[in-house]
Image (cartoon, helix red, strand yellow):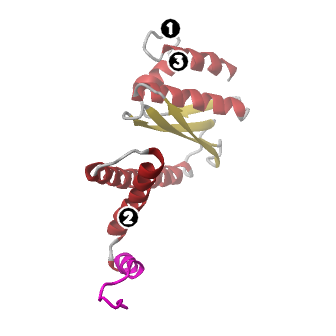
Amino acid sequence: MAWTTNMQPNFWEWLTMVFEQGTDEQCRYFFYAFWLLWYARNQVVHERVYSTGVDLTQKVQNLVAEYEGVRAKKSLLNMVCNQRTKKTLPIINIQFDVAFDSRNYRSKTGLVVWGNTNEYLASKSFIHYDVVSPFATEAYAGLEAVELGIEMGFQEIQIQGDSLTVVKKYQSTTIDYSVIEAIIRDIQAKKLGF
């Protein structure tokens, strides 16, 4: 390692050493921390929004946890794909999953469309703002799945999500009186087209 005249390593040498000698997890933490420091700096300069060290630490931990969650879901999706090669679904399958941010009242929705011979057909993602609950987020995701099926021109679809309560409301033929009544009504009206 080259040293400058005052016997201190320069930043790039130090950073290179950290990434060469650090574990994958340590490098991820450094990457997220540097990115968040730059983001926090831009917020101070451009928006006059200040973050504390505690806030930044929590955000780094949240980013790492989100990454680990995505990696676990990808692994699960690969397992599901391998199982799909063994059995054929009779119809188009649209799977959805959501993430809800209660601090900002927004949600992220991901949709994946599988063909009737288990081939990947499409995927789509959305961000919804001003969503009041995870319950509503799941309902919006189901509505987006139905609308995607209509846009793609399918005659028959199967929608899969991980909220049993919301899925039961989709399947019901009775009038729903919950907080997601309007969304359920939209889904029930649109599913008549299949």
Element on which disc 3 rests: helix
User: Answer yes or no: do the residues labelled 1 and 3 have beta carbons within 8 Å?
Assistant: no
Residue 17 sits in quarter: bottom left
Q: CA distance from mark 1 to mark 3?
A: 9 Å
Within 10 Å of the Cα at label 1, are there few (<14), some (14-19), or many (20+) other Cα atoms? few
Q: Which residue does the numbered mark 3 point to in the structure image?
A: 184
Is the N terminus in the top left, top right, bottom left or bottom right quadrant?
bottom left
Q: Earlier in the sequence, mark 2 or mark 1?
A: 2
Q: Is residue 8 magenta?
A: yes
- For the point 29% across and 89% down, the residue is 7
Q: Residue 21 placed where, x, y %?
A: 33, 79
Element on which disc 1 rests: loop
Closer to us: 85 or 184: 184
Residue 62 lies, with reference to residue 194, above or below; the image says below
Is the C terminus in the top left, top right, bottom left or bottom right quadrant?
top right
Residue numbers of the magenta segment: 1-20
**Amino acid on which disc 3 is placed:** Ile
- Whether residue 154 is visible to the viewer of this picture, yes or no, is no
The tag on residue 28 is 2
Q: Residue 152 placed where, x, y %?
A: 71, 35
Q: CA distance from mark 2 to mark 3?
A: 41 Å
**Amino acid on which disc 1 is placed:** Ile
Q: Which residue does the numbered mark 1 point to in the structure image?
A: 175
